[in-house]
Image: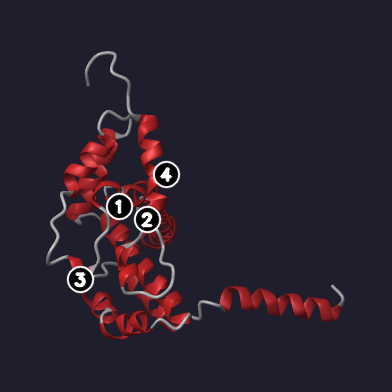
Amino acid sequence: MAPNKPKRDIDLLFEIGSLRNVPRAWQQVLSGRVQNIVEHTFRATMIAWMLAIAEGADVSKVIRMMLVHDMGESRTGDIAFLHRGYVVRHEDQAEKDMFEDTIMAKDTAALLKEYEERKTLESRIVKDADNLDVDLELKEMVRIGDTAAERMMKEHRPHVRSTKLYTKTAKKMWDDIKKSDPNAWHMALAGKWVKNKKSGK
């Protein structure tokens, strides 16, 4: 970095904010409002945190890696399965340019390299979390009657479960998602509220 050249930390923070406006590319074939990149990253990070605890991994590294795993999409955009045969993205260059001259440049370069190589438990957990968030969102889309999401879950996602997930915990979580009711968390609270009201609590 040239002497006296200001770091781009604030520019980076504004660019990260712009990811709220970058949709997931599969909105082209799904009916409901799909997550943007920031929403996906937040829930995937929570999934990764859970997996890291269960698998005895370095939680701090997993969270940091998860937070930056899709940052390059600020500049490349997201692509879905139907685009992969036609679109070439320069993700490595986008990530390098995005973090260049920021306080995070060295750390993020190492984390992203580790993530792409998939050799460590932490990098595999991050990829597992990335995949599991897809299954959660598909389940939410099925709830509102999206037939494309339903077919993806039946015809494509079982392949992901058997060939793409690395950890035992992720495979167990995938099974649990498959059997889950996306409404269960709030219906249980509603039932408890009704029960307490009847008992005068």
Question: Looking at the picture, how far across and down is residue 30, in whole percent?
Answer: 36, 74
Q: Residue at x 44, y 83 (%)?
A: 145
Tell me which amino acid carries mark 1: Asp
Name the quarter where the C terminus is drawn.
Answer: bottom right
Which amino acid lies under the numbered mark 3 shown in the image of this protein? Answer: Leu
The residue under label 1 is 70
Q: Position of residue 91 (x, y in %)?
A: 19, 49
Which is more N-terminal, label 4 or label 2?
Answer: 4
What is the basis of the colouring in this image? secondary structure
Horizontal and vertical percent position of residue 172: 37, 75
* Between discs 2 and 1, the one toward the N terminus: 2
Front label number (3 vs 1): 3
The reply to whether the C-beta atoms of the residues labelled 3 and 1 are less than 8 Å apart is no
Q: CA distance from mark 3 to mark 1?
A: 19 Å
**Circle 2 sits on which residue?**
37
Q: Nearer the viewer, residue 191 or 51?
A: 191
The amino acid pointed to by label 4 is Gly
Instruction: Give how far apart the Cα atoms at labels 4 and 1 are.
Output: 13 Å
In this view, the residue in front, 200 or 56, is 200
Residue occupying image coordinates x 14% and y 60%: 87
Residue in front for this viewpoint, 131 or 138: 138
Dot 4 or dot 1, earlier in sequence: 4
Please name the residue that numbered disc 3 is placed on: 82
Q: Secondary structure at mark 2?
A: helix
Number of disc labels: 4
Q: Residues within 10 Å of mark 4 (few under 14, many from 20)?
A: few
Q: Amino acid at mark 2?
A: Ile
Residue carrying label 4: 17
Q: Residues within 10 Å of mark 2 (few under 14, many from 20)?
A: many
